[in-house]
Amino acid sequence: MGGGQISRTCHREDTSVERDADPPLFAGRFALGTVSEPDRDPFPALVVPDGRALDLRAALRDPRLTVRGLVQDGWTDALSRLRALAADTGGDWQPLSGLRVHAPLEPRQVFQSGANYRQHVIDLAVAHRSPDDTRSVAEAREEMARTMDRRAAEDLPYVFIGLPTAVAGPYDDVVLPSWAEQPDWELELAAVIAKSAYRVSTEKALECVAGYTIANDLTDRATVFRGDMKAIGTDWLRCKNAPGFTPLGPWLVPAESIADPGDLRVTLKLNGGTMQDESTKDMLFGVARLVSYISRTARLLPGDLVLTGSPAGNGIHWGRLLREGDVMEGSITGLGTQRTRCVKESV
């Protein structure tokens, strides 16, 4: 996985690594990241809110340790050790300002939720009404709102599978494939699975979550549906899984530091202008219901990602898709900020 140097060129202008007056990098006493020194291999790091990092390979005496390994080898025990390390100011800490930040972990499986924000689905349904639809916009919105409320109460989530190879760092350049005609952003809350889970109940589902991070689940709108095979429907491989189409991170923030994943602000800015700004309260299916639903069919494994869907305000809504030179800045309450720049593919 790639990464980006924490600096004014790839982080927000008022970077909290460089300015003591800035707010903490994330909620809670510590988070996990994967970082590297210049021209060196990435290593798992314990990160504290004032912008310092501790190499966990040395601290835990495991030269092969990764963030995913830390999660899968016993997350409850790992948390105890991490709390103790975070409280020890005498460790071999180093400033984040000299490190490159990669995606916080390499996931095993990636599960992606679609059509999971009430307002987003209403907007899309109204915008793409049939030309023969004689209802007013207000009438169409009211009817779709009733449908969404029924769906949240009675229906099942809509989940599909992504590829780990699409994951990139939170400050990496996003390479827009030459074939992608309508590349779009989709900022999302992502849950990281802590332990194997199969047929887990909604009530116990959050016990399977190690923590949370930020994902931008990019989509090429032009290839979502197969024009040559309309009966088959969506082509998630083509539209979502180009290399780097899932910028992830910057941090894995433990679930214990996030009071309510159903009450976080999801904000994406494009070139400084706010495009998405919604609360996870608008989700039709919260993290617990998504994890439980997925586990009814698939066995969730430690280190898996569960992406929870994107709120209203995608590019297709604004009529403004991504192009070379665009800069996306995505943040979620308590999880930090990622910043990525779009570049053309070199053919």
Image: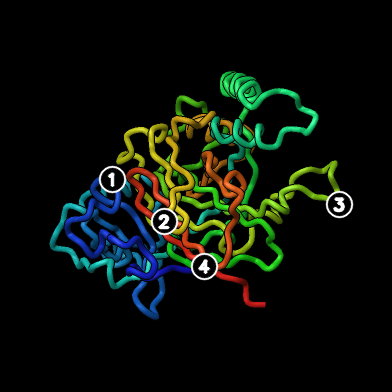
Q: Residues within 10 Å of mark 1 (few under 14, many from 20)?
A: many
The reply to whether dot 1 and dot 4 touch (C-beta < 8 Å) is no
Look at mark 2 in the image and give the residue it sits on.
272
Answer whether residue 104 is visible to the viewer in this image: no
Q: Amino acid at mark 4?
A: Gly
| Residue at (44, 68) in percent of width and height | 3
Look at mark 4 in the image and give the residue it sits on.
325
| Residue at (54, 48) in percent of width and height | 186
Please identify, in this view, whether the residue under mark 1 or under mark 4 is nearer the observer: 4
Distance from label 3 to label 2 (Cα)? 38 Å
Q: Residues within 10 Å of mark 4 (few under 14, many from 20)?
A: some
- The residue furthest left is 90
Local secondary structure at mark 2? loop
Q: Which one is earlier in the sequence, the residue at label 3 or at label 2?
A: 3
Please identify, in this view, whether the residue under mark 1 or under mark 3 is nearer the observer: 3
Instruction: Give the percent coordinates (x, y) of residue 208.
Output: 45, 37
Q: Nearer the viewer, residue 282 or 66?
A: 282
Instruction: Give the percent coordinates (x, y) of residue 173.
Output: 50, 68
The reply to whether dot 3 and dot 2 touch (C-beta < 8 Å) is no
Q: Amino acid at mark 2?
A: Gly
Q: Does residue 255 appear to the left or right of 239 in the view shown?
A: left
Q: Which one is earlier in the sequence, the residue at label 1 or at label 3?
A: 1
Q: Does residue 76 appear to the left or right of 185 in the view shown?
A: left
Look at mark 1 in the image and give the residue it sits on.
27
Please identify, in this view, whether the residue under mark 4 or under mark 3 is nearer the observer: 4
Q: Residue 228's mark?
A: 3
Q: Amino acid at mark 3?
A: Asp
Distance from label 4 to label 3 (Cα)? 32 Å
